Amino acid sequence: MENIKHFLGNFFVTGEPMIYMADVAIVLVSLGIIFVLTYFKKWKWLWKEWLTTVDAKKIGIMYIIAALLMLFRGGVDALLMRTQLALPNLHFLDSQHYNEIFTTHGTIMILFMAMPFIIGLFNIAVPLQIGARDVAFPFLNAVSFWLFFAGAMLFNLSFVIGGSPDAGWTSYTPLAGKELDPGVGENYYLLGLQIAGIGTLATGVNFFTTIIKMRAPGMSLMKMPMFTWSVLVTSVIIMFAFPVLTVALAMLTIDRLFDAHFFTVAAGGQPMQWANLFWIWGHPEVYIVILPAFGVFSEVIATFSRKKLFGYHAMVFSMVAISVLGFITWVHHFFTMGAGPGVNSFFSLSTMLIAIPTGVKVFNWLFTLNKGKIQFTTAMLWALAFIPNFLIGGLTGVMLAVAPADYQYHNSYFLISHFHYVLIGGTVFAAFAGLTYWWPKMFGHILNERLGKWAFWVFMISFNVCFLPMYLVGLLGMTRRMYTYPAGLGWTSLNLIETIGAFGMGLGFIIMVYNIYWSARYGERDTTGDPWDGRTLEWATTSPAPEYNFAHIPTIQQVDDFYYMKKEGRQKEISKAPYKPIHMPNNSGVPIIMAVFFFIGGFGLVFEWIWMGILGGIGVLACMLYRSFETHDHHYIPVDEIERTEREAGRFS
Amino acid sequence: MKKIGLKLFAALTLLLVALTGCAADNQNVLNPQGPVARTQFHLIVWSFVLMAIVVLGVFIIFVVVLVKNGKKNNPNYDPEDDGNVKLEITWTVIPIIIVILLAIPTVKTTYDLEKPPKTAEAKTPMTIVVTSADWKWIFRYPEQNIETVNYVTIPADRPIKFELQAKGAMNSFWVPSLGGQAYTMPNMQMSLWLQADHPGDYIGRGANFTGKGFAHMQFNVIAKSDKDFNKWVQHVKSTAPRLTEEKYNEILKPGTVGRMTFSSTPKDDGADLDMSGMDMGGMHHGKH
Ligand code: HEM
Ligand SMILES: [Cu+2]
């Protein structure tokens, strides 16, 4: 009896009123969802239309819903941290709790918010932009999504079962080793990221193949939309960078679970090697989340300047240059580890070099605006705000690249501010811009512009109120990851301002969510499929696009061909009868079931219940085996169904 | 150029600091109190000036472009305007020049900081071994045979070679007024040169996260004139208790402690502590 009590006391996170409240909320929300689904008899619909889908458009929507949920979770973490730091010596959170929160905040924001958000946009826009019917491997695409989802859920479970990781999103050894960090928290980090990471790797392979092999006839690489280009380059980075993460996570898992010594000081391990491996993945990772953002801005700025993108070739070339340079800068994350002046000089230079192609891109955006007819829509506002905000983040990044100066910025709030300026001013602004821009394509209605602009201004201004003072407080010696600080160091007023800004960002997010609700009910419906008078192929089909995307795959003549199609009246050919049956992949329940087994196996390994890990592994293998023998994996959409769909959209001709 | 930038920057920071109330000036990157911090400060100012030029340029273009082309019926509207070789060369060359202007002093300073800072008279450097433990700082004076915890007394205007190491998690030794940080690691020793211009009390802090007690890893660097420093050493020698091995191991246990002073260092305590006084040449674990 005592044993069981003891086990349960450790198994469930206890002793924190906030966590009990969360427990209750989770149970209530789950019951609510189950009730609603049962009451409205929606289980079958959910399973058939969503959980088993292999349609990239729907997978993209699921990615983005998950990303928004994770943005909420990470944002609540951020507000908790900012509340604790509002004034000196507060006791809102204790040290352990704060450490867990900044760890989950960072990890969730990068891996379970930024990544799925941009991958969601890949899924929504890329197949349409290149005139394809789906991605190259639709089944694998569903596997990717469900692995991400299983990883994210496993990671979030740590909040209520077993305890959260607490060694930072960088999880540096030896701190993250078993000796200094016993308990299951770090195991959650390792296995959650491992499972999601495998999914991401598959996404890289999938989109690389899709873009290389499935473009519409006539669309040579240099005629692709810039967003698609950014996804192509990003996919290559994913394929080279993520295996490093996989290996590093596996090594640390083996250290923790099976007492190996890759990263322990004892028995000749090399704790510093973790930092090395982590950042060999980690720096390319920041380009994985920023290059697609560049792609989104290129689309939005060109569309709402009503103009071609300026310097197309330079844009492509600079992205390729950034992706290559991105692999030789990782040491700038530990200039202070004593690699010697030669090494530090090299990595200072390689990092500064990245500023050149990035600068080229900024000027190209500015000159896309020039001689344009600028429309200040919500999506455009996010894109415009990106330029000055990202500039500040990028230039402080160049300051950080100056190795001897970095000795003074490193690990301080100066650094925190820098990367939030690039991550929020770059990736998050792009996520919001892309969401607003492609929302009609996803759901068939337009987000309210008035609410959207309110959300934009509140969020953007609050963002600067929150993060600009951090540069200064960093120079005044405040280090990151402090759960509290003494009074009298000149930090207090700055911290208070930051906290006010943080809550302002929360308010901006709430307006955005309200806008989603409002627009779903009352928003303007998009019957044209082309609400922004767009330039690329995703606007050539209905909103939302039919399962098969295009009745006929168009032939492409130039960059922004849809713009010229409209001018020359060629766009009608896409939906012109007669039709031919269209070959499409079948839905499959295997990906989600496989992810459940990954989750079970991962959960077992977190608690070092090896039998459960093996059980999960067997389940995964069984799913693969089953899939290998599945022959019934595609179907044809008959002509009359295409006719009906096109007629309903008013496009039949 | 550099001079004007410096003044401008100083004025700007003063303004900001005034705005934010009283910043402690003994823990401020922008108010350097030693040659290392000053070198780094100059580099920071130089990079800031270069970046400010870029910011100014881009912001001006940004605003002009928006104002000019944000009108309903822009007379200059040209949907086919998609490139200009001259312009594109210009904005490739300008960043290259800026990077060169920044890279040269960067590399030079990176190498300079490996050497001890120069003093007015050529004074012999002094070595202090720094150990970060969970969660306190332990300072050992191999020449004086003294050990202190959570504060370190140094002679002003004399180069100090801090030999850095860690027990437990990796930390980072940072005294913003005197100079930038370097990691303390459990399996590799590093050295960091710092020097204080004047006697004073400077705040230092562990900068790399080490778990529960991390936020409390604040320490003081107390710089004294040569005379006062020697007096302090004599005082410690005659009044402070000896540091036994048991006591030392007790200090190493995870937890926070106050300031402590000892008139000796524990004798046979593990190899890595005993190496501290010697020339480190061939004995480093790992690369340098
Ligand atoms: C509401 C907006 C946000 C606020 C107020 C906020 C605030 C903070 C604060 C105060 C810290 C420092 C914690 C500490 O060192 O003690 C932090 C860390 C971090 N944030 Fe955010 N953040 C926000 C959004 C984001 C977003 C959107 C991302 C990524 C896309 C992000 C990524 C990170 C990362 C990676 C860390 C480092 C975590 C670590 O030290 O392990 N944050 N954030
Ligand atoms: Cu980096």
Image: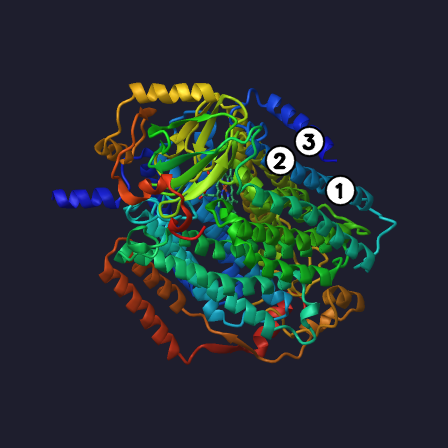
Chain identity of mark 3 = B
Select label 2 or label 3 by which is in front: 3
Q: Nearer the viewer, residue B224 or B96?
A: B224
Q: Which residue is mark 3?
A: B6
* Label 2 crowd bin: few (<14), some (14–19), many (20+), radius 10 Å: some
Residue that protrudes farthest toward the left in the picture: A1
Query: CB at mark 2 closer than 8 A to ligand 1?
Result: no
Select label 3 or label 1 by which is in front: 3
Question: Do the residues indicated by labels 3 and 1 lie within the same chain of the protein?
Answer: yes
Which label is found at residue A461?
2
Q: Nearer the viewer, residue A349 or A78?
A: A349
| Image-quadrant location for residue B216 | top left
From the viewer's perspective, is B133 left or right of A464? left
* Label 1 crowd bin: few (<14), some (14–19), many (20+), radius 10 Å: few
In the image, is residue A556 above or below residue B53? below
Residue B22, x across and y down, in percent: 55, 20
Give the alpha-carbon distance from disc 2 to disc 1, as whole Å.
22 Å
Q: Secondary structure at mark 1?
A: helix
| Image-quadrant location for residue A126 | bottom right
Q: Which residue is mark 1?
A: B57
Which label is found at residue A336?
none
Inspect the image, locate mark 1, and give the three-letter code of the amino acid beneath it: Gly
Chain identity of mark 1 = B
Which tag, 3 or 1, sits closer to the chain's start?
A: 3
Residue B1, x across and y down, in percent: 75, 35
Inspect the image, locate mark 2, and give the three-letter code of the amino acid beneath it: Ile
Q: Residue at x 63, y 35 (%)?
A: B42
What colour-coding does the image apply? rainbow
From the viewer's perspective, is A633 left or right of A622? right
Residue A410, x across and y down, in percent: 51, 40
Q: Residue at x 36, y 40 (%)?
A: B276
